[in-house]
Every structure is written in structure tokens, then in C-alpha cells.
Image (spheres, rainbow, N blue to C red):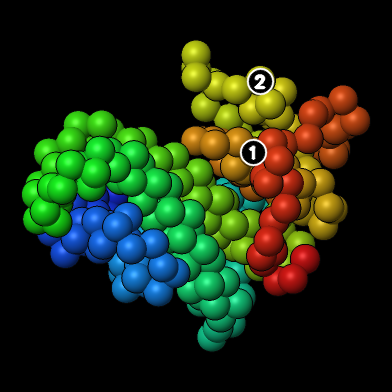
Amino acid sequence: MNGIEEKHEKNIKSLIFDDNFLKMLVYQAKTPTSENFIIGRDKLAKVFEAYMLESFVGGFAHGKDEVSKARQYFKVKYSEPSLEVDPVTGVVPDEAIAWYSYYSTYLAGIYSEAILEKARDIIRDSIESGLHGKDMVKLLKNSEEFENYSEYRLQTITRTEGTKAYNKGRLEQFKDTGDFVRAVQYSAVLDRRTTQICRRLNGKIMDIRNDSINTYLPPNHFNCRSIIVPVTRYDDWEESDFSNIPKPEKGFDNPEWTPNGK
């Protein structure tokens, strides 16, 4: 995704290891009330929101570019008419912006609670031994265990959610082409890290109007790298049989927000 993940992961890591954020972690670990950590979660949510919207826009733009190239090809071959551009075509829908604003708060809560729990584990002994707050901040900042855990959880979230936002952007663009894009094909990265579900879904075609697209739109597991590619009205295709394809992992078969309410 052209460095989008790395840029925002760097921003989030900078926030997590900022002294003020670590102080909030320590304070929350020592005084576990629900109000203490709201400021930290809000800051995280803003970074997650920027990341997911940028991923969505990336998928939206890349999808538009692919459709434009396909139209140009078929214009020569089949006299495909040029795309009539409406003034609002190409604009990220308001419902997408609203969804990611809401969803980023949820993700920030999941991530912050996970690293807070890890922080509690690390500083529990230091609390019992009377270590001062600033020394606990230093302990977390220099803890390889805390850094590795925070980074692992962060990468899992950003890579999974980035794939989701990117593919939703592509789907939105494909649905906005009138009758030109009629289906999408599942395209997995095939290497030794590819999961069984993505291997079995690779190459499968889903009618853009059918519910199967909401069930199997990537991601279908944590750290999924698959994308959807357009199938046009000029392509020879038929919808694939999904009867013996396993359902995605729990939590991955619900599209939550679906472009155009479809």
C-alpha cells in the first residue's frame, strides 16, 4: 500500500513511547479507573482514523485507475463509451468518513487496552517494590518485551484494518461504474505465508450485486494481504461456487459498513 502502513505505524509508535503517554499508562495501571485513559485513546483514535481513511482513499483511487485503463482498452476494441464524469463522482462518500471516525475509536480502545494490560504485567513488581512513577516510565520505555508486544499488536491491527479499508475503497469505486464492472475476482498473494482460506479463495469470482462479496471481501483473517480486482462486462465469467469454501474467521464475515448500503 505504498508505505501507508509504515508511515502510520511510525506515528503510533511515536505516540506510544512518548513520555506523557507512558505516564498515562503507569497512572492507569496504578489507579485503574475508566476515566484516566480517555485522552490517550483519543490521540490514538485520530491516528487510526487518518490511516484508515488514507487506505480507503488509496483503494478508491487505485480502483478508479484500473477501471479507467480497462475502459480505454475496450474503447478501442469494442467502442466502449467514455466514462461520463458526474461532479460528485470520485468523492469519498460521507458515510465512509463517518464510519472510520467511529471505528477508529473502537480500534484505539482495543489496542490501548492490550498494551495497558502488558504494561500492568511489566510494572506490577515495581509497584510492589515502591518504584516511583517516573522510574516506571523509564522501565516501560526501555523494555524490549513491551516494545515487541506493542509493535506486534500494532502491525496486526494496521495490516488487517488497512486491507479492509483498501478493499472497501476499491469496491466503492467498482460499484460506481454503472454496468461496466459486473463482478470482482479474489486475488491472494501466494507464498509460504498464504493461509488455506486465501489459497482456496484465490481466483474466485463474486457478482458485485450478490451477498457473497460481503462475506468474503478481504480481509478474511488477521494480516490478510488479499485484494479484489474488477471483472468487466466484456470479460467471460461466471460466479464461482462457494459451497465448499469455509467461512472466514470469526469477526471477518461481517462487512460492518458496506459501500452504497449494498
Question: In this orientation, which residue lies closer to the viewer: 124 or 254?
Answer: 124
Residue 112: quarter of image: bottom left
Which residue lies at the image location 24% right of the left edge and 44% below the top edge?
128
Disc 1: which residue: 220
Which residue lies at the image location 40% right of the left edge and 74% below the top edge?
35
From the viewer's perspective, tell me whether residue 228 is left or right of residue 156: right
Q: Position of residue 231 (x, y in %)?
A: 70, 45
Q: Height in image: 262 above or below 26? A: below
Residue sticking out furthest to the front: 129
Question: In this orientation, which residue lies closer to the viewer: 236 or 192?
Answer: 192
Identify residue type, mark 2. Gln
Identify residue type, mark 1. Asn
Disc 2: which residue: 196
Mark 2 lies on a secondary structure that is helix
Which residue lies at the image location 40% right of the left edge and 41% below the top edge?
153
Q: Position of residue 223 (x, y in %)?
A: 49, 35
Q: Position of residue 199 (x, y in %)?
A: 65, 22
Which quarter of the figure is the C terminus placed in? bottom right
Q: Position of residue 225 (x, y in %)?
A: 51, 35
Mark 1 lies on a secondary structure that is loop
Which residue lies at the image location 48% right of the left edge and 73% below the top edge?
101
The tag on residue 246 is: none
Answer whether residue 68 is visible to the viewer in this image. no
